[in-house]
Amino acid sequence: MSTMSSPVEFLELLAREAAPVEFEGPLVAARAAGLPADRLAELEQAKTVALRVRALLERRRRRETELSGLYDTVSDLAGLRDLDDVLRAIVHRARNLLGADVAYMTLNDEERGDTYMRVTDGSVSARFQRLRLPMGAGLGGLVAQSGAPYVTANYGEDERFHHTGEIDAGVGEEGLVAILGVPLRLGSTSIGVLYAANRSARPFAREEVALLVSLAAHAAVAIDTARLLAETRSALAELSAANTTIRAHSSSVERAAAAHDRMTALVLRGGGVEDVAAAVTEVLGGALLALDAEGRLLARVGEIDAPDRTDIVEAVAASRTEGRSVRRGPLWYAAVVAGAENLGALVLRPDDELVDADQRILERAALVTALLLLFRRTVAEAEGRVRGELLDDLIARPLRDTDALRSRARRLGVDLDAPHVLVAVGDDAIAATGSARQRVLSWATTYASARGGLAAARDGRVVLMLPGRDAGGSARAVARDLSRVTGRPVTAGASGPAAGPTALAGTFHEADRCLTALGALGRAGQGASTSELGFVGLLLGTVGDRGETDVTQFLSSTVGPVIDYDARRGTALVKTLEAYFGVGGSLARAAEQLHVHVNTVTQRLERVGQLLGADWQKPERALEVQLALRLHRLRTPAA
């Protein structure tokens, strides 16, 4: 017998991992060689043993491959962190390990009470990929409900499952026939199903079921790990956000405490609105405006333009209504109020967004600003009363103890021996209400104090004592500025300069007479001094309430026809009369002054005679005409 007909040949076949059909070769050769029956039986036995050995080796090789695959799967899953990556890796590995056409996974939906397709590998049907399975429906529904593996060699013909039109349509569109489903379990809880499926009818061996069960067990752990990791990350993110919020809140609280301490210190050491504005911008950043109730600037820190007046009024009204700061565009507004009184506003343009604590800082700054403004007003009113009482004592008669008056004045920064002018403001500056009178007096006190002077209310009028020598200029300045404050024309009469306590009372009475004269001349809303009115002012300063009416009647009866003639004809008769009297009645000098011919002057004076009567040049009548011309000039100083 040749060696090829011996059992050794089966060992060679095993060594080169020959196919099962090749193990029939030695027997065929032995029969062809005519070997006896006992040798054929020996070879048959050797072939059977060799095939059993081959099967055992094949199972061990397959098991080694499965274990290696499981090890690789566990290694891959351990390195994954994203849940979607974990699920795709599980399904892809299941398909490769089982050599299936398609692998997929469904997960349970606790809220809806069903299971849905989560991820697929090898699928081509969109309908299949969107399937949802009711618990107990189809193979997967049964696995999800029971928690046990199920396998079918031909799903369409298997009557063990509850078929539905939607599931069968999806499976049919995908072309699946043989399906294996195993549960994804965490302890006693099923969270989904892992599948392997083929597009041809073939059974899944027990080893394949066991392999998919093992893979599903690892997959369930990996899914839970990924879920826990995601939840941990979410919790860490929430903790981080909470920590950031706590830190930001803590920082804002610290800023608020620091701002509170700083603003308290400002109040205690007598700081001003400018200091409050600087403190706010140092704490919150940005730029800030402090405005009074009229929208005038009290303080500015940083580069910021004043908003439109309408915007300020609307925002401050909203802030007062809401009782807190309000935002309008990039600006924050906080109303500065004391009870129901509007004192102004703080306008902040921050560099960063304001949190609630930052808004509280701005609102606290508005409160401190209100306290400072009230304190400033109280101090100003107290000082104003002291200064007003001093001026009232100075202009009263008789004076008591001039040395004491000088001492009081020095304490207020006023030198009574320096030249001063006295300005009397008329009743037209003071409206009927007490608040308006107080407002005028408050303005006068501030105005005089800023210039080193005094102000007081006396006999229904407001009196200002101002350093300087220009009485007329001071009167016009007071009339102009106070008119802007009150919104109505203000008349101011002035006198001076005067120096020394004893001279001030007489100067005040001259200023008061000048004010009366301005009223008599019809120059309400203007300012002038006694020196500018001359002797006519002194005369008119003594008239009563009907002074202006008397002056008008006198002018009308004396030179009224001439004034009216000039007004109607556009002539210069009044001017010619003034020039004529001004040069002592010389026609030639009057003509020279008027830049006209002497005949022209003669003709004009003849017309005057026709209007006033032939006796207008007689001494008594001429004096009346000259006085009337002077009054007319004083009534129309711009002419």
Image (spheres, rainbow, N blue to C red):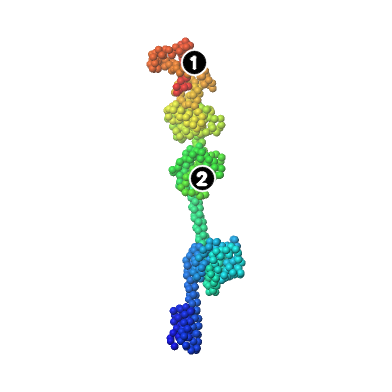
Q: Amino acid at mark 1?
A: Pro
Image quarter where the C terminus lies is: top left
Q: Position of residue 117 (x, y in %)?
A: 55, 63
| Tag shown at residue 561 | 1
Q: Camera-side residue: 164 or 466?
A: 164
Q: Position of residue 362 (x, y in %)?
A: 50, 46
Residue at position x 45%, y 81% from top? 13
Report if residue 175 is visible in the image: yes
Q: Position of residue 143 (x, y in %)?
A: 58, 68
Please give the residue where the numbered disc 2 appears in the rendered image: 327
List the single residue furthest toward the top: 614
Q: Residues within 10 Å of mark 1 (few under 14, many from 20)?
A: some
State whether residue 294 is above or below residue 611: below
Q: Is residue 590 left or right of residue 81?
A: left
Residue at position x 51%, y 36% from top? 381
| Mark 2 vs 1: CB contact within 8 A | no
Q: Amino acid at mark 2?
A: Arg
